Image (cartoon, helix red, strand yellow):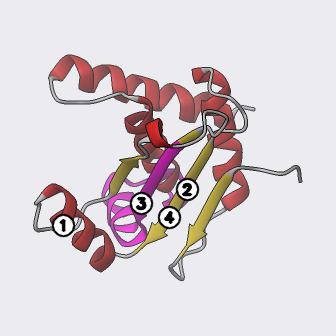
Amino acid sequence: MEQSNQQLINETDAEIDLRRIQKLITYIFQSEGLPTETIINIVFTDNATIHEFNKKFLDRDRPTDVLSFNVHTEYLPSELQILGDVYISAEKAKEQADSFQVTFQDEVERLVVHGILHLIGYEHEDPGQQEKMEALTEQYLELSNNK
């Protein structure tokens, strides 16, 4: 496999197909016009860790499914293309997969797309933005799964 700037870290016991995640990230980067050298970290963690981050950084005292943290690159060398970090609770993903009646892997991939879209600049603060982000998420998942 070629050298990648996508670091995927699974801190849990959950079985996640990281090759599918890598292909999905590459597909999103290509579709969004991001350089292939773009650096991103995806961390699969537990509810306790994501709860701690959610409280510390967003003042929300509860676990969540996904958190995205942009890297402020103004102080870094211009040749570095760093997008940021995405943290995903494998526990929340499992709960949501059961609730939505989808596979765990499919839910994890949906959260990966959602987190990356936030890093790129998409938001869902109002219904129009939410609709656009959901449509784009579904488009990336569908097209990626058909590749």
Which image quadrant is residue 124 in?
top left
Disc 1 to disc 2, C-alpha distance = 20 Å
User: Where does residue 94 sit, x and y in percent of width and height?
Assistant: 40, 67
Quarter of the image with the C terminus in it:
top right
Left or right for 102, reference 27: left
Which image quadrant is residue 86 in?
bottom left
Would you name the residue on which mark 1 appears?
56
Residue at point 60% right, 32% down?
28
Would you name the residue on which mark 3 appears?
87
Disc 3 to disc 2, C-alpha distance = 8 Å
Query: Which is more N-terminal, label 2 or label 3?
Result: 2
Residue at point 57% right, 49% down?
40
Neighbourhood count class around disc 1 (C-alpha, 10 Å): few under 14, some 14–19, many 20 upward? few
Neighbourhood count class around disc 3 (C-alpha, 10 Å): few under 14, some 14–19, many 20 upward? many
Neighbourhood count class around disc 2 (C-alpha, 10 Å): few under 14, some 14–19, many 20 upward? some
Neighbourhood count class around disc 4 (C-alpha, 10 Å): few under 14, some 14–19, many 20 upward? many
* Disc 3 versus disc 2: nearer the observer: 2
Instruction: Indicate the secondary structure of the residue bearing disc 2.
Output: strand
Residue 14 magenta-highlighted: no
Residue at point 60% right, 40% down?
77
Q: Which amino acid does label 3 sit on?
A: Tyr
Do residues under tags 4 and 3 come within 8 Å of each other at their CB atoms? yes
Do residues under tags 3 and 1 come within 8 Å of each other at their CB atoms? no
Residue 92 magenta-highlighted: yes
Image mark for residue 43 = 4
